[in-house]
Image: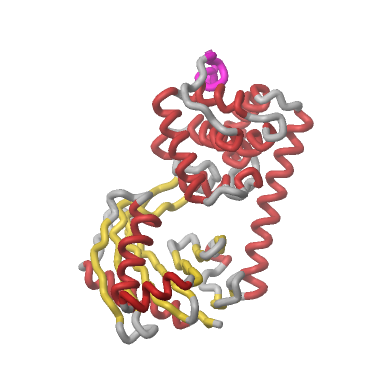
Amino acid sequence: MTKYDKIFGVEDASEESLSPEEAVAAIAVITAIADSPVEEVDAESLAGVLWEFEVFEEYTEDEIVDIVERLISIAEEEGLGPLFNTANASLSDDIVLDGFAAGVIVLLDQELTIPKQKQPYLKKLQEALEIEDEEAQEIIQEVIAAIQEAEEGDEAVILGDQVYTSPLGNFTVAIPVDPQQGGRIQSQDGVVGFYDDLGTLLRIDYYPLPSDQIKELASQGQEQYLQSILLDKYVPQAIFANLPEAQIRYTEYLKDDWQGSYYALVDMPKGFKIPQQENNGTATRLDAYRGLLAFINGEFLYIVSSQRSFLDGETPSSVKEEAQEIKKNILEFVQSIEFN
């Protein structure tokens, strides 16, 4: 019995049905788990990888996270073999190569090569998907080229422009991370995040205010409106949904900042992920505090956030001290934003 017979050597199929897109995601999940404990596989990291695939262009990243979490549960309950058999049967002819590409991108290391110990798995996957050697090599090279192009594009943005401009033209901001320290930008509709290998996380969420929200703001008043948006909507959807153990530890209305802004500190146990060097969806999780500041400028609602993580064994200061320090960092960052 070979190492990967538990995946490619069984006949049972999953009791769950999969769409073609879910089948592609399943290949990524199976590949991540094939040589790693399932608890080390991080759904958000895998979703971030899959989100770049054209087959998921109609999905939000949160929707892909939900798909990946469901697939991980299936793998735990029914095994990798039944999940693979169902995924393989669910891959339409025009999407089989995407499934193989999803496996490839999970296996690539930091040097964009397939580690020698991973190559037997990739060969088994290729054979199971009935992909010819020449075609498989083409897919591998295309995946590597796409990653290199994306990395070069990110570096060009950081080194060349030094400024990020919102696609809606409502703000510009000096890029606060350094590519020499792993600085990178992640942007999608209504949000941009700046990250680096030192643990920096600065994020701007922005929403045009429709007429009904403007009326609600006028009716409730600035403080109540911002409190409701931040504590009753944003935090539950963006944080609690992924970290049920997280909790709000501090809140404050800042009447003199941005004509009234609302600040909150969220305690996130194991809420910060340090990705491993390989793109295999695994991550180390650290405890973290995230501060969030909600305010209105022009016709937009903004939620700007910053995060502080704690190394294993590191003891945070009091909640109030941590809240004030993170608030200070956010306010300094907001000062660097030029609103149009």
From the top left corner, tell me how far across and down residue 93 is, in percent. Answer: 71, 29
Left or right placement of residue 102 versus residue 228 in this view = right
Magenta residues (range): 1-11
- 130 sits to left or right of 242: right
Q: Is residue 3 magenta?
A: yes
Horizontal arrangement in the rendering, residue 258 relative to residue 114 (left or right): left
x and y, in percent, of residue 74 in the image = 44, 29
Horizontal side of residue 39 vs 249, given as left or right:
right
Q: Quadrant of residue 157?
A: bottom right
The location of residue 325, given as percent across then percent down, is 31, 74
Q: Quadrant of the C terminus?
A: bottom right
> Is residue 88 in the magenta section?
no
The spot of residue 34 in percent (x, y) is 51, 30
Q: Nearer the viewer, residue 228 or 91?
A: 228
Q: Hey, which residue is sitting farthest right in the picture?
A: 134
> What residue do we see at 41% from left, 28% from top?
76
Name the quadrant containing residue 259: bottom left
Residue 135 figure quarter: top right
